[in-house]
Image: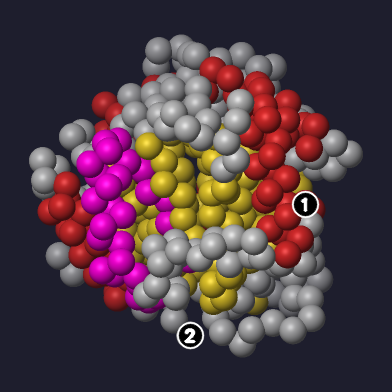
Amino acid sequence: MRILFCIFFLSLGYSGFAQKRQQIQYSASANSQGTSDAVIVDDVPLIHTTQFLPIDNIGGIIGKGDVIAQFNQVFSNISFALKNAGSNLDQIVKLNIYLRNSNSVPAVLQEISKMFKAGKSPALSFVTGNLSHTDALISADAIAVSVKINPESVKYFMPQNLSSNVGSARSAILPAGPAVYVSGQAVKGELAEATRATLEQLITTLVSLGLEKKDIVQIKSFIRPMSDLQVVEQEFANFFKGANIPPMVNVEWTSKDPVIEIELIASSPVTGARSSQQLDFITPPGMSASPVYCRVVRINYGQKIFISSLYGQKTEDADYELSTIFSSLGTILKKTGSDFSHLVKATYYVSSDDHSAKLNEIRPKYYDPLRPPAASKAMVKDVGKSQAGISMDMIGVVIK
């Protein structure tokens, strides 16, 4: 089916800037009516939220056993966080949804179709596994355009009546302009030790880019087991003592070693000489380059493309499943004015060793070895679609 575009114009007033017109473009899904294959957004300030649970403002779980009631509470929390940061639900360009059971996906999709106007659905990503609250059936984080605030540096928001990830910011604004996507890093060891060492390694990477802790917009951790999340949160509290803890997202993976991998997004203010290229593919000092993923990708300018989770067409054959995913990705990239060498970030969720191995084999067929996206690959309980063994969550840029 031909992919259709709907251009949605927003009138935005940025603090300290003249009012201007800004556009978000929605690429309708070829496979699922009412959803988007991709969303394109101009170089504007983007709010990244923490991962919200279905918890009220005093920390109580809402709708125990009822995924719809919990969905409503999660999005009530997201709505409040966005409003606090100068935005609203209509400006969401990407939703990352985490479910305890993939059987809940159809019900959640139905609720999302009610929440957003036809043709203006955000890009969606689903993954299944244990959540950080034993009674939670759903959690989510969002990326949205900030329609009122364009800070010169990362701005954190910590409204006290939102109970989630105690001690971390509920949202942060990535200013318009250059940004870096840092691939997942992992140091082996027991969970506390590994978390601490990995955070130190990530900061070393940022320093090599001329950046600091205060430039971090969001951190995502892949951990095992989720029941030990408090260990991770305590290490974050220690590491960021005296500073704001960026919005945190936590995904349980089934990897046995390492026990944690951490990736991040950061603002990259122009300091000194900067490449004239739209994207810089960077290997920090002391790290090795790979032909299938880049340690750091920096966007210097241009429109971002957020692509919904991609699944294969045939699930019993891992080779065919992966080839159809990359074929679909190629089609979406072409329709959105991009290509494989302009991918910025990839998150691969895999639920079998076979799919993980086949992914390693197929990536060199599509990626320029000098321009692969930053990436994390997480072994998870379920990728959000019955019988599927892999999903791919991608971010790219429109070629300039």
- Label at residue 272: none
Q: Check the image and report above or below for 393 versus 271.
A: above
Q: Check the image and report above or below for 26 versus 315.
A: below
Res 99 seen here: no
Residue linked to disc 2: 400
Q: What crowding class fits label 2: few (fewer than 14 Cα within 10 Å), some (14-19), or many (20 or more)?
A: few
Residue at 64% across / 48% down in the picture? Answer: 218
Res 199 seen here: yes
SS under mark 1:
helix
Is residue 348 highlighted in magenta? yes
**Which residue appears farthest toward the right when viewing the image?**
242
Q: Magenta segment range?
A: 338-367
Residue 111 x %, y %: 36, 36
Label 1 amino acid?
Lys
Q: Which image quarter: residue 15?
A: bottom right
Is residue 85 highlighted in magenta? no
Residue linked to disc 1: 213
SS under mark 2:
loop
Residue 118 x %, y %: 33, 54
Q: Which image quarter: residue 170?
A: top right
- Where's the N terminus, which quadrant? bottom left
Mark-to-mark CA distance, 1 and 2: 30 Å
Residue at 21% across / 54% down in the picture? Answer: 322
Label 2 amino acid?
Lys
Residue at 48% across / 19% down in the picture? Answer: 136
Q: Which tag is nearer the camera, tag 1 or tag 2?
A: 1
Q: Check the image and report above or below for 273 versus 197.
A: below
